[in-house]
Amino acid sequence: MASTTQIPLFFFFFLLLITNSVSSQRIHSDDSSDPLTDCSGRWIYIRNLPSRFNLDLLANCSEYPLFDNFCPYLANHGLGHKTHNKSHSWYRTDSLMLELIFHRRILEYPCLTSDRNLANAIYLPYYAAIDALRYLYGPDVNSSMEHGVQLFEFLQSDAPEIWERHMGNDHFLVMARPAWDFSQPLENDPPIWGTSFLELQEFYNVTALVPEARPWPWQEHAVPYPTSFHPANLAFFEAWIQRVRRSKRNTLMLFAGGGGVSASPNIRRSIRNECENNSSSSSIHCLENIGEYSQICEIVDCSNGICEHDPLRYMKPMLQATFCLQPPGDTPTRRSTFDSIMAGCIPVFFEELSAKTQYGWHMPEEQYGEFSVFIPKEEVVFKGLKILDVLMGMPRSEVMKMRERVVELIPRVMYRRHRSSMGLTGIKDAVDIAVESTLQKIKARIQNFLAQ
């Protein structure tokens, strides 16, 4: 019942932080004297939005029984509560809190400016996914085409010159749900699923950072799902990296998830069948190319969301596995992809939309063969290809190289804790890379806009 007592304090401190953000950050008059900070082309102006677009939305955290009570996950500025009292870096993080996590982190960005005319990009601290809950699960389900209208009206009425300077091409925001959830056609009557935020012509020029993009991502770009690992200093980060490298891999392949129990053919069912047929752990399995394993395949049952806020359920098995299977579910992407990377477990994909064509900023598309395995799901489901045969056919030396490349990806997909130590902030994490890449994307958009 922590939510009823801790939420008011959270509101107070978060509001205080936001209210004083620009004045307390090292804005351009301060940064110009710091030779270590080059803010040329990197200035960001945080748009001051009314609280109804962010903080007020958090007060409704328990009002969507069809969804979930997300009050407990608001703690620690969206990281959630620690997994246990002695934990330094592990939290019960909910993916929906990505907007809060990003907002809190961008307040520490070294190149914030209070001069909107100097800004290279405008950040909108709008909690779009949380606001979308009233359209998806609440009283406004029949008005989902109106999602975003009030925000645009505000941008047009309050200092409209900020928007009009580049007609929104320099604006960006974070939306903590797949882009599909904001892509319902405006003409759908009655609404089917989702809101129409990304279908509104008014926001065509705005860059949206989402955990899953559509195949034609003009407006949006995918960023990693937040995992539960949020170290605050370099010592905690390096200790985890050492644990990942030292971990003994006793399981060849692992699947952490649900589904696959229906009668119809699908990749999850194929995985379950193959795993159940090779799940004996009574002896050591000597595989010719890739070493000895006490277990060929393991399934961590995460049905009904039981793993979502409990990383202890799946991180230890992932630390002990060489390959982590990442089949698509309701949508192509999975948070589990990034959980497995945190554990140094080589991801095995069955669709290119699951990661390769999504997260190019954080995991370059041309490098996927160096840290992951791709097996077309059609080959497995309809042509009888065995996943085990593919993985067993890989030379041990190649597997070792791939695992090391996975470990090297950990900082790039990690969301470090806010107020991290100086040593850790010197390592670019998911937010740093997202901001840097967004600035480049916006620069190109503005150039195209001015050329028209």
Image (cartoon, helix red, strand yellow):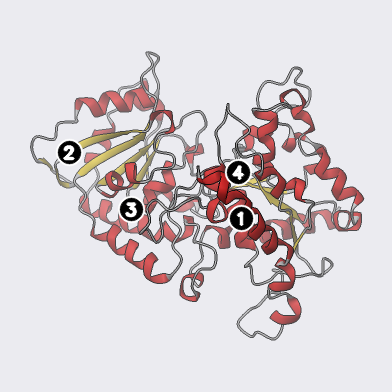
| Residue in the image at 57% along x and 41% along y | 212
Which sits in the foreground, 217 or 115?
Answer: 115
Residue 77 location, x and y as percent? 57, 55
Sequence-first disc among 4 and 3: 4
Q: Secondary structure at mark 2?
A: strand
Disc 4 crowd rating (10 Å Cα; few below 14, some 14-19, many 20+) is many
Q: Tag 1's secondary structure?
A: helix
C-alpha gap between disc 2 and disc 3: 18 Å
Q: Residues within 10 Å of mark 2 (few under 14, many from 20)?
A: many
Neighbour tally class for label 1: few under 14, some 14-19, many 20 plus, Cα within 10 Å: few
Q: Position of residue 435 (x, y in %)?
A: 63, 60
Q: Earlier in the sequence, mark 2 or mark 1?
A: 1
Q: Which residue is mark 2?
A: 295
Residue at 36 percent across and 67 percent down: it is 238
* Residue position marked by numbered label 4 in the rendering: 176
Give the residue displayed 55% in from the left and 33% down from the top.
Answer: 68
Q: Nearer the viewer, residue 422 or 223?
A: 422
Q: Residue at x 84, y 67 (%)?
A: 117
Q: Quadrant of residue 131?
A: top right
- Say if 238 sits above or below 332 in the image: below
In the visual, does 123 lie left or right of 242? right
* Quarter where residue 258 is shown: top left
Label pair 4/3, CB-CB below 8 angstroms: no
